[in-house]
Structures are given as C-alpha cells and as structure tokens.
Image: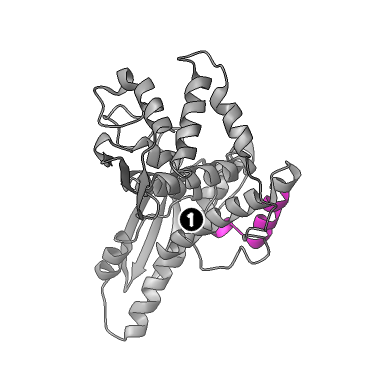
C-alpha cells in the first residue's frame, strides 16, 4: 500500500520561509510533489508533520489556512490510494502521482466566492452576481477579512454569524438572505469537491418571514412627479428613473438599463426579463416619453433608451 506524508524543506537562504511538499512512497519508489505553501522552520513540527500555529507577526490565520488546505489535500490523496487498493489491480507510483497531480487545487472560501462572482458576471447574471457580492462581503466583514477553508465552516460558526448580523440591527429577512446566499455558495463548493457535504445551515433561519405590506399612494406618486428639482443633478435623474420604473410596472433596474430603443415599437415596449427570461409587453404612455425626451441628447449615440449605459458596457454600473 502506498503512503503519503507532508514534509518540510528549509530554504537555502537563512531567515527565509521553507516549502511544504508531499512525500509519496510505493513499493520502495519515492516521489516528491511540490506545493505553493511556505512556512518558517519554527512553524513546522517535523515529528507530527504539522504546522505550529503561532501568532508571530499576525500569521495565525495564514498558518491555519495552510494547515486546512494541506489537510484537505491529504484526504484527497489518501482517498485515491484507498480506491486503488480497493480495485485489487496492481498500480505503480506513477499511476498515483498522475491522479494526484490532476486533483483540483484546494481553494479558500474567499477565493471560491470571488470565482463564482466572476462566473456570474461572465454569464451576465447581474442580479445573482450582486447577491453573491453582498453575501460574500458581509461574511468577510464578519470574519474580519480572515480567509478560511470550507472545512473550517461549521454549524456553530453559522449560528455565530446569524447572531452577529442580528446584533448589528440587520432585519430578519435580510439576515435570511445573507445566510441563504451563503448556503448556495457553500453547496456549489460541495458540488465542486471543495467542501465537505455537511448541513451547516440546519440551525439558522434561511426562510423569509411575512412582513406587513408597504405601498406608496397615488397622491405620494403625484408629489414625486411634481417635485421641483434642479435639472441635470443626480436627485433629478434618480426621480426620473424611479418614475419610469413605476410606469413600466415596477421594471427592475437591470432591465431598465438594458432597455433598447428597438424594444419600443407601435406604442408598446417588448422585453425579456434578465432574471427569469419572461417576455413582457407594456403599453408606452406619454409620461414615459416625456422622460425619454428629457435625456434624448445624452442617449442620441446610444442604443439604449435610458442614460444608464453608454452602449460599450456588458453590464450596468454597480
């Protein structure tokens, strides 16, 4: 049976970090598999093949992260060896080394979050990207920007995170949103083989609670329409965008941003919602045209109806 251990190789330069590597042995053959993990000599316990987690120069979180990543990688390599042995077919050290080198690299939680955000941006799923950004930023704030591995995320940590949000006055449904989005990201990590399939969200509230309906009256809408605001200023533009969203049956901002001049035909607006891909038709009315005419000079060289995008971007401003 093959064996694998974590080893430390000191730097040839005094005072510099050494390198961790994996030492693979099978049928008296040896292989070294290098890593990108670096620690100082006094941060390594050779007898236990483990990192000595110290807080020298605030390196505690960094060392814990490396230890978690090597733990994860060791488990994956040991699994490969167990599977080979279970097959009952002879194999060489090269066979094992090849499979180990094909393993996906272990990602930290923050790095995985950033990867998922980039994917949603590339897919132009702007709403989902925004949700991921909000949830990731809030969790990073809770962590004091100290990264971690998915194996370090526990049910107790999620309960502490929930309490941390409540203690900062975050509303119940907003807390549920952060936790629900975090759960989605965690489940994606499980699917990618980066996180253990643990139900760490079983003791926190991820469902919304019913709240009292809040609606603005027609009288208040009229007041907003008649507000005397200085033309060309941001508040004036914000009022216009709010009104046209209202006129267009509460159209989402991202849909307004991508609304093209070609979507307006025969006094009807036809568009597909970017979130659900639902096709909608809305009657074009005079108040809408008044707002469009107001910004005609700004949008004359743009394919878009509203002065949000210039025509060069792939997604609206965030």
- For residue 220, above or below residue 28: above
Q: Is residue 71 visible?
A: no
Q: Is residue 79 visible?
A: yes
Q: Which percent across, then down, holds residue 307?
A: 36, 26
Mark 1 Cα shell of 10 Å, populated few (<14), some (14-19), many (≥20): many
Q: Quadrant of residue 224?
A: top right
**Membership of 238 in magenta stretch:** no
Q: What residue lies at 48% left-to-right and 50% top-to-bottom?
A: 108
Q: Which percent across, then down, holds residue 163?
A: 73, 51
Which residue in the protein does label 1 denote? 185
Q: What residue lies at 70% left-to-right and 52% top-to-bottom?
A: 212
Q: Which percent across, then down, holds residue 122?
A: 31, 45
- Circle count: 1
Q: Quadrant of residue 19?
A: top left
Secondary structure beneath label 1: helix
In the image, the segment drawn in magenta is 151-163
Q: Quadrant of residue 31?
A: bottom left
Q: Quadrant of the C terminus?
A: top left
């Amino acid at each position: 049976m093959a064996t694998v251990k974590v080893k430390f190789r000191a730097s040839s330069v005094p005072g510099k970090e050494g390198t961790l590597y994996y030492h693979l042995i099978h049928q008296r053959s040896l292989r070294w598999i290098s890593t990108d993990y670096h620690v100082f000599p006094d941060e390594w316990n050779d007898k236990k093949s483990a990192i000595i987690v110290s807080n020298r120069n605030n390196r505690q979180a960094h060392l814990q992260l490396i230890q978690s990543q090597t733990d994860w990688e060791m488990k994956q390599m040991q699994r490969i060896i167990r599977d080979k042995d279970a097959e009952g077919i002879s194999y060489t050290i090269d066979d094992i080394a090849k499979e180990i080198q094909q393993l996906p690299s272990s990602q930290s939680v923050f790095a995985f979050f950033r990867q998922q955000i980039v994917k949603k941006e590339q897919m132009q799923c702007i709403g989902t990207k925004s949700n991921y950004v909000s949830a990731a930023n809030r969790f990073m704030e809770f962590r004091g920007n100290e990264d971690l591995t998915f194996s370090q995320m526990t049910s107790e940590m999620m309960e502490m995170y929930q309490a941390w949000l409540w203690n900062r006055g975050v509303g119940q449904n907003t807390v549920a949103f952060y936790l629900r989005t975090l759960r989605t990201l965690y489940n994606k990590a499980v699917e990618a083989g980066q996180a253990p399939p643990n139900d760490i969200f079983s003791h926190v509230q991820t469902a919304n609670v019913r709240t009292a309906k809040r609606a603005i009256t027609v009288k208040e809408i009229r007041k907003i329409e008649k507000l005397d605001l200085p033309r060309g200023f941001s508040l004036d533009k914000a009022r216009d965008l709010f009104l046209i969203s209202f006129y267009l049956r509460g159209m989402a901002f991202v849909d307004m941003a991508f609304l093209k001049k070609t979507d307006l035909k025969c006094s009807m607006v036809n568009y597909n919602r970017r979130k659900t891909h639902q096709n909608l038709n809305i009657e074009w009315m005079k108040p809408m045209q008044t707002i469009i005419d107001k910004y005609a000079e700004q949008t004359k060289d743009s394919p878009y109806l509203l002065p949000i995008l210039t025509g060069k971007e792939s997604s609206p401003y965030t």
